[in-house]
Image (cartoon, rainbow, N blue to C red):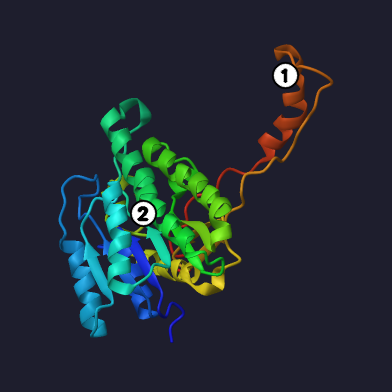
């Protein structure tokens, strides 16, 4: 009996990389999976149903039964999101987990970033998450089962959490996913749904597009294998994780971290409306010492500390 025995998951971006690693581990732990992947290039161009079909065939051949079904649709198309739910229900009779991994990169400094590259990245990441979660949440609401152990697992990025300078479109989308996840956790709890986000650090075909001179990690290092992210997604997807919702976790190599949520760390109040002149000294007195003393955002865990 696996920790995901009998559970049914939709996994987007599951034809390669982190999504494929999650699909393999999920099936190994007893789950049934709908494997979605458009099969596009790293920048979102083109399409090929091959990667999704290959992973589904691999899983089915290994298990000796139909534990996976493939879909090659564009996850940012709302019709794809609806179809993925229907595919799960028609094939396995239910849906327990949605894992949103699919994503693209179109990196540019903001002053070189064209509108089409902004729109494409926002569309795949934010609308792609909406596309799967909207029909899944409606289905779970209809079940009227507050003990359903339903799971939404979204993928954010340290690019947004720490502000990668050449990825303003990607960073904006990924921080949007954090806010979306927290809203889902608050709004869907009464229906038995938890929602969490994972910020992964792994060597994938997307990280392979980073020029060698700018890369701060070894693309071939097993420490950064996508397989090392999958156990985090497996725990969150299990029935054991009911207590965890609205949170962002970091997973890279053998390092797993839990982020805090934004909170006030200092305040000041006035006796009446502030003026521009009157508020400035309070910024200097109350906020500046704290801001000057804050540690810079930690960098990615991009190498094996034991190597």
Residue at the (27%, 64%) spot, across then down? 87
Q: Position of residue 142 (x, y in %)?
A: 46, 60
**Label placed on residue 280:** 1
* Above-or-below relation of 292 to 45: above
* Above-or-below relation of 295 to 61: above
**Label placed on residue 152:** none
Q: CA distance from mark 2 to mark 1?
A: 46 Å
**Label placed on residue 132:** 2
Camera-side mark, 2 or 1? 2
* Above-or-below relation of 289 to 154: above
Q: Position of residue 262 (x, y in %)?
A: 62, 44
SS at circle 1 = helix
SS at circle 2 = helix
Judging depth in this view, the residue of 108 and 99 nearest the camera is 99
Can you tell which quarter of the image residue 276 is in? top right
Judging depth in this view, the residue of 114 and 70 nearest the camera is 70
- Kindly tell me whether residue 225 is visible in this rendering: no
* The N terminus lies in quadrant: bottom left
Residue at the (42%, 80%) spot, across then down? 5
Q: How many marks?
A: 2
Which class describes the residues within 10 Å of circle 2: few (<14), some (14-19), or many (20+)? many
Q: Position of residue 9 (x, y in %)?
A: 37, 67
* Above-or-below relation of 306 to 106: below
Can you tell which quarter of the image residue 222 is in? bottom left
Residue at the (33%, 74%) spot, across then down? 32
- Left or right placement of residue 77 versus residue 244 in this view: left
Judging depth in this view, the residue of 10 and 228 nearest the camera is 10
* The C terminus lies in quadrant: bottom left
């Amino acid at each position: 009996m696996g920790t995901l025995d009998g559970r049914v998951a939709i996994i987007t971006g599951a034809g390669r990389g982190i999504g494929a690693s999650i699909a393999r581990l999920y099936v190994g732990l007893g789950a049934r999976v709908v494997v979605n992947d458009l099969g596009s290039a790293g920048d979102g161009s083109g399409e090929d149903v091959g990667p999704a079909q290959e992973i589904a065939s691999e899983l089915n051949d290994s298990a000796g039964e139909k534990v996976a079904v493939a879909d090659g649709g564009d996850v940012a198309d709302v019709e794809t999101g609806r179809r993925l739910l229907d595919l799960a229900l028609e094939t396995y009779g239910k849906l327990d987990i949605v894992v949103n991994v699919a994503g693209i990169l179109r990196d540019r400094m903001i002053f070189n970033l064209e509108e089409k590259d902004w729109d494409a990245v926002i569309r795949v990441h934010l609308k792609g998450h909406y596309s799967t979660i909207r029909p899944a949440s409606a289905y779970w609401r209809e079940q009227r089962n507050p003990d359903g152990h339903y799971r939404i697992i979204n993928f954010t990025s340290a690019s947004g959490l720490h502000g990668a300078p050449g990825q303003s479109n990607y960073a904006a989308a990924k921080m949007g996913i954090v806010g979306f996840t927290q809203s889902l956790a608050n709004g869907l709890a009464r229906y038995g749904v938890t929602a969490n986000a994972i910020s992964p650090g792994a060597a994938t075909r997307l990280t392979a597009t980073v020029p060698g001179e700018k890369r701060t990690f070894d693309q071939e290092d097993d420490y950064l294998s996508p397989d090392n992210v999958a156990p985090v997604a497996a725990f969150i997807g299990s029935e054991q994780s009911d207590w965890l919702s609205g949170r962002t976790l970091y997973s890279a190599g053998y390092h797993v971290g839990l982020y805090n949520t934004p909170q006030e760390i200092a305040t000041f109040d006035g006796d009446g409306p502030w003026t521009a002149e009157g508020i400035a000294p309070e910024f200097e007195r109350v906020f500046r010492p704290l801001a000057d003393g804050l540690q810079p955002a930690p960098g990615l865990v991009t190498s094996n500390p034991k190597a």
